[in-house]
Amino acid sequence: MPPPRPEFGSPADVFYNDAGALRYTRSGRVQQVQRAMTIRALELLSLPQQQQAFLLDVGCGSGISGDVVRESGHVWVGVDISRDMLSLAKSAEDYHRFGKGGSGNGDAESDADQGTQVDLRNVKWGLIKESDKDESEDEEVSEREGDGTTVPGPSTVEVIRGDIGEGLPFRPASFDGAVSISAIQWLCQSDRKGHVPQRRLRALFQSLYNVLRRGAKAALQFYPANVEQVHMITRAAMLCGFSGGVVVDFPHSTKAKKHYLVVQAGQLAGGFVLPPPLSTFKHEHVESICGDDGVEELEESEDDVEQQAFIRVGGREQRKRPRSRSSGVGERRRRKDNRPLTGSRDWVLLKKAERRKFGLQTPDDTKYTMRKRRPRF
């Protein structure tokens, strides 16, 4: 059996207590998966290259996804309901600022004690002129562009404790984008009296729409328990003014399948086109918002994959089987056991014998049983 979902057991602030938050943050597997999903979420945002953005991390937790945002050169602010998770996120601020050693004074003293030599041949002595400043800045920019490296964002960790189901406490049009990793599925549960999942989702998406700038995107990764949750989440986002849909990476894999709700706040010229998902197949698909709960076999021909432009919610589209004509006896579906074919004379006699065995009123067997009648006018 698969392990039970954490949102089914207890609320997020209770599940991620002191011990739970520490166990979650120290897990190497969790960090690997969280970082990979955050990198994918940043790709779905399609942010401008070599430009720092101000991002919101919805359900930031202990800051694992925020570290990826910082390493990508962006500034982020997080919101989460677990106080212990936010404490771990704030404790990581000193780690990024001073390194593993702890305080910055100790590192400076250790460097001075080691007596490392510094090359002073290219140092210009004297007053710094404006022309020298411009030249040095141009050299730094050219070096960054030549190396292709991204300068990490500031090490300051800004987090706020709050329930995302009650809205986001930020000013309107404050963020250039938003990411969320494994958070919004918690809103689909009714943990306390008065919690209505539809209302909490509407509160989240309405406040998220307000705090994003016009044209900004949000990539929200979540684990739906069933198809109804996917419909409920996407419907709440569309009712609040967002445009977009659900992108499913690796839709034919049970373990690697990931759902991303990619939406855009406001309309821009040219409209909004969903980015293509990742897939192990040659042809890639995008999951539409509306769909049925269908199950399909994993093996598909190339013609079927080319004709299938969208994947329904739930993963796969049920392949229709041709109906067999019931006129001919040879074309009827045969039974696996030794019982007569369904609808034949022997089958009717067998069913009538079973009825007599239970004492039910049954017509007598005659030579006219299961004989075709003449057509009537």
Image (cartoon, rainbow, N blue to C red):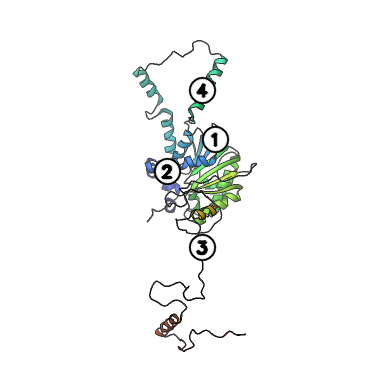
Q: Residue at label 3?
A: 320
Q: Is residue 78 above or below residue 354?
A: above
Whole-Å distance between the Cαs marked 1 and 3? Answer: 48 Å
Upstream in sequence: badge 2 or badge 1: 2
Going by the numbered disc 3, the residue's amino acid type is Lys
Whole-Å distance between the Cαs marked 4 and 1? Answer: 23 Å
Q: Is residue 216 above or below residue 149?
A: below
Upstream in sequence: badge 3 or badge 2: 2
Q: Position of residue 278 (x, y in %)?
A: 48, 46
Q: Residue at label 2?
A: 33
Upstream in sequence: badge 2 or badge 4: 2
Q: Residue at label 1?
A: 54
Q: Residue at label 4?
A: 140
Q: Is residue 377 found left or right of 251 in the rendered image?
A: right
Callout 1: SS: strand
Q: Position of residue 31 (x, y in %)?
A: 41, 41
Going by the numbered disc 2, the residue's amino acid type is Val
Query: Is residue 173 visible in the rendered structure shown here?
Result: yes
